[in-house]
Image (cartoon, rainbow, N blue to C red):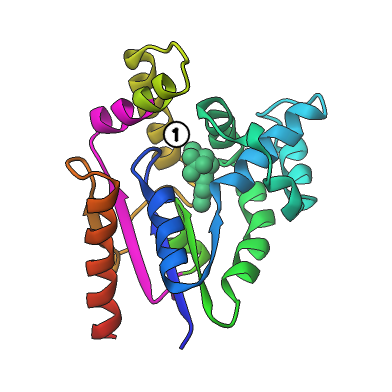
Amino acid sequence: MTLIIAIDGPAASGKGTLARRIAAHFGLAWLDTGLLYRAVARDVLANGGDLDDVIAAAEAARVIEAQSLDDPGLRGPKAGDAASIVAKFPEVRAALLDYQRAFAAQEAGAVLDGRDIGTVVCPNARVKVFVTASDEARAQRRFLEHLGRGEAVSYDDLLADIRRRDARDSGRSAAPMLAAADALHLDTTHLDADQAFEAIMQLIAARVAGN
Ligand code: DC
């Protein structure tokens, strides 16, 4: 039976790592949909455009190519912040919808993570999980990632970045970040990566067994 798993949640909640591990566990393909929005922002800027220009952003979204998502330049909070600006445009979201739905339509199913997977992209997903963590825990995770790479950064700046991005992603009118009514909830504030994976696998097993 086809297994589509939708994982939504805010930045640094742990949803990406969880989605990757879940996909590996079930032998499913995984799409990090944030990369699509990050790539649109990258391409707008590379063309000399403005992130607030809806026409430029929608055009970049229409011509996005899968191989261009494999770009280390798309990682990091700056690219994430730029992505969140173009993601507010309904025209950009509409242009990226077919790509995401085609990905989810693979015979075995797929794992997709983002902000609107359970609500808009795959409302019929068999399993939906909304992953959260406190603002402080998420900022602390980002802080440790930067330290690990030897980059000097302020915890307070990271916390402010996370809050600004959450506000933008939840406050927009087009497909805001939102838990689907039938989503399972996982708070990873006090969990390390292995504990969070164990917890989400239990939720998924219960949901799949109950279906
Ligand atoms: O998951 P991420 O941090 O890579 O996402 C970057 C931005 O892209 C996020 O702040 C909002 C936008 N996004 C979105 O609007 N919808 C999605 N399904 C995924 C990401």
Q: Is residue 46 above or below residue 106?
A: above
Q: Is residue 174 visible?
A: no
Magenta stretch? 123-142
Taking depth in this image into account, of 210 and 173 the one nearest to the observer is: 210
Whether ligand 1 has any atom under 8 Å from the Cβ at mark 1 is answered as yes
Q: Is residue 5 visible?
A: yes
The residue indicated by pointer 1 is 168
Residue type, mark 1 in image: Arg
- On screen, residue 49 versus residue 27, left or right, reads right
Question: Is disc 1 placed on a helix, strand or loop?
Answer: helix
Quadrant in the picture for the C terminus = bottom left
Q: Is residue 106 above or below residue 75?
A: below
Give the residue at x 38% y 50%. 15
The spot of residue 155 in percent (x, y) is 33, 16
The spot of residue 42 in percent (x, y) is 70, 33
Give the image quarter of residue 78.
top right
Total of numbered circles in the picture? 1
For residue 139: magenta?
A: yes
Give the image quarter of residue 144.
top left
Give the residue at x 67% y 62%. 99
- On screen, residue 191 versus residue 92, left or right, reads left
Taking depth in this image into account, of 130 and 196 the one nearest to the observer is: 196
Q: Can you name the residue that lies furthest to the left here?
A: 190
Q: Is residue 97 above or below residue 194?
A: below
Give the residue at x 40% y 28%. 145
The spot of residue 182 in percent (x, y) is 29, 69
For residue 198: magenta?
A: no
